[in-house]
Amino acid sequence: MKIVLTCDSRWGYTPEDHTPFWTSLDTVEYVTGLLEETGNTVLLVEADDAFEFRLREIMDKHAKPLAFWLNEFMPTDSGKDMFTASVIEKVGMMHTGPGSEASGIGLNKEATKDVFRKLGLPTPEPYVVYSGDYSPIYQNGHWNSYVIIKPLLQGNSRGMDEFSVVRADDFGSIRERVGRIHHEFDEPVLVERYIGGENAKEFTVPMFISFDGRIAELPITEIDLSQIPVAQGRFRFLTHDIKDEKYYLKIPAELSPEIVRRIHSNVGRIIREIGCRDMVRVDLRGDSTGLYYLEVNVNPGKNRFSYLTTSAYSLGLDYPEIIAFIPYQAMLRYGLEPPRKLEELVRSVMALFDTVQSVAMAA
């Protein structure tokens, strides 16, 4: 099987004292080795300004190549990154993971909230502030609570630090924070009601998705907020500088079976609505008033110690099996025959769809 493995050399190699980044060159080398060991031929392609041309060349030379994109984004002449999958789709190449439309919904926190609202799922009240128009700040000052301020289009808690939570009626502080994010990220800013307090809890819900629409539910993970450093003397939330730590995780989360079933059912509805593929992770927060849906990671982190892989380890899975599941599902989705060695490697992952409660996505 010919697999086009995309990469972005801007990421370079991971520093020795860090867990390898998913898009780093050391991960590229690891995935290349894994694919070749399981009977595939890897064609490594740099996602740069010649990316589309190279893909078309490959399609002219090889029958039914499959693109495995490691880098979700690629550079453009405008200076703004674009979805790698959008170029792959443009040339008509089969690929792993979600399409560009689903990726766009998952990336945009307000679009994700639109999905939650459509499905009748609770989500914190938000407003969006665009560059040059600060009027939403003053129009929403009636909230008798705190707000948390985030870049609209960033993941992995980028743009979040200890000063991200502000009183809803502190217009000056909100405007200063919003302006800083506008300047740093050149994108709109999401301001949403902060779910906090003594009873606050945070959870992340990882799942595998099969080519035929079944869902294998991995253990829900709790972010133990009591282990998170206190910001401003009273707030606990994940910031970018501690997002890759794992000392604060509880697997499985301490939830009643009824709540777990309800969460899994709702996440299944989200998956269907957005069109997620292969893997997904949904984040929630709760307080004394209930659970609130925050974000959908349609392309969740997949390094060795990401939330999804850590949850999968608790079921006895190994890292190579988890990563091999991605191209394996794509091959089945497009009607391709996976190499025998690849099929053997993912056997334990596929067994989850029979041994844990699975939810059929087909209506």
Image (tube, grey):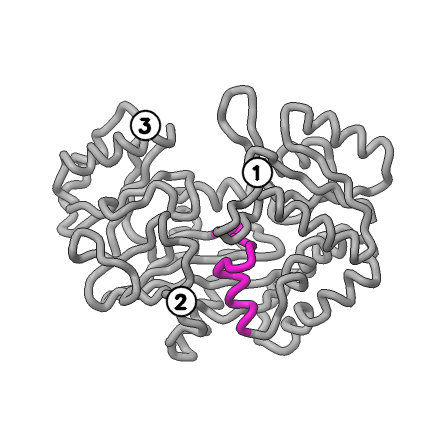
Q: Which residue is mark 3?
A: 183
Circle 3: is it few (<14), some (14-19), or many (20+) Cα within 10 Å?
few
Spatial separation of the CA atoms under disc 1 and disc 2: 29 Å
Where are the magenta residues, as a range? 297-314
Q: Amino acid at mark 1?
A: Gly
Badge 2 element: strand
151 on left or right of 347: left
Spatial separation of the CA atoms under disc 1 and disc 3: 26 Å
Nearer the observer, disc 1 or disc 3? 1
Q: Which residue is mark 1?
A: 12
* Sequence-first tag of 1 and 2: 1
Quarter of the C terminus within the rendering? bottom right
Spatial separation of the CA atoms under disc 2 and disc 3: 33 Å
Badge 1 element: loop
Image-quadrant location for residue 245: bottom left
Circle 2: is it few (<14), some (14-19), or many (20+) Cα within 10 Å?
some
Badge 3 element: helix
Identify which residue is drawn at 64% across, 24% down. 49
Decide which of 273, 193 is in the foreground and name it: 193
Q: Amino acid at mark 2?
A: Leu
How far across and down, in percent of the image, does residue 338 sit? 81, 57
How far across and down, in percent of the image, does residue 134 sit? 23, 29
Q: Which residue is mark 2?
A: 249
Circle 1: is it few (<14), some (14-19), or many (20+) Cα within 10 Å?
few
Identify which residue is drawn at 40% across, 73% down. 253
Pick out the residue farthest to the top.
77
| Residue 245 in sight | yes
The reply to whether dot 2 and dot 3 touch (C-beta < 8 Å) is no
